Image: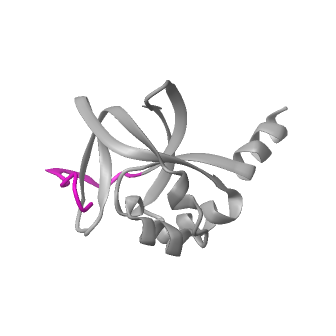
Amino acid sequence: MKIASSLRFLAMTVLFLYGTLLDAATLSQRSGNAALAARLVPATLLGWQRVALRGGRYPTLRRQRSGSIQGALVTLPAQALARLAAYEGTAYRLTRVVVWTANRKTAARAWIAAAATRRPWPAKGS
């Protein structure tokens, strides 16, 4: 059973996007899959804040009880996940999160780096 669930994770992954990958052109280019941008589903992550990565030009997430982040869910195949993992780099780890869509809450993964600052990241143009 454990092997089967690992293979299912590798086959298709539900990913919560909150930063640069929300841009359709960036998502298409970095994932190698132009169709993904059309499949984004608006979602909200509660209990987290989008902040700047220490020494970087990119956002990450930091737990904050009253926080709320607007982003999007996308379900992607293993090949696209591998390409996005290369783009995200070694500072980020896929972390399980629970997000809300218009209809329900759902489990997803989000890339989160440990080197988070307390400096809020702008919601638009991130």
Asked if the magenta segment contains residue 4, the reply would be no
Q: Residue at x 24, y 62 (%)?
A: 125
Q: Nearer the viewer, residue 12 or 10?
A: 12
Which image quarter is the N terminus in? top right
Q: Does the magenta stretch include residue 115?
A: yes
Q: Nearer the viewer, residue 49 or 91?
A: 49
Q: Residue reaching furthest front?
A: 38
Q: Tell whether 32 sits left or right of 120.
A: right
Where's residue 113, x and y in %? 38, 54
| Image position of 54 with respect to 49: above or below | below
Most foreground residue, 63 or 109: 109
Q: In this view, does 19 lie above or below 33?
A: above
- Residue pictured at 69% horizontal, 49% vertical: 12
The figure's colour scheme reads one colour
**Is any part of residue 2 visible from this angle?**
yes
57 with respect to 40 (left or right): left
The answer to whether 20 is drawn above or below residue 122 in the figure is below
Can the viewer see residue 89 in this picture? Answer: no
User: Measuring 76% from the left and 43% from the top, which residue is drawn there?
Assistant: 8
Is 106 situated above or below 36? Answer: above
Task: Magenta stretch: give its range.
Answer: 112-126
Q: Tell me the quarter of the image containing the C terminus.
A: bottom left
Residue 100 position within the rendered picture, expressed as x and y whole percent measured from the top left = 43, 30
Q: Is residue 112 left or right of residue 39?
A: left
Could you tell me which residue is drawn at 36 percent across and 36 percent down? Answer: 44
- Where in the figure is residue 108, as x and y percent of width and height? 53, 39
- The mark total stands at 0
- Location of residue 118 in the rendering, given as x and y in whole percent from the top left corner: 16, 48
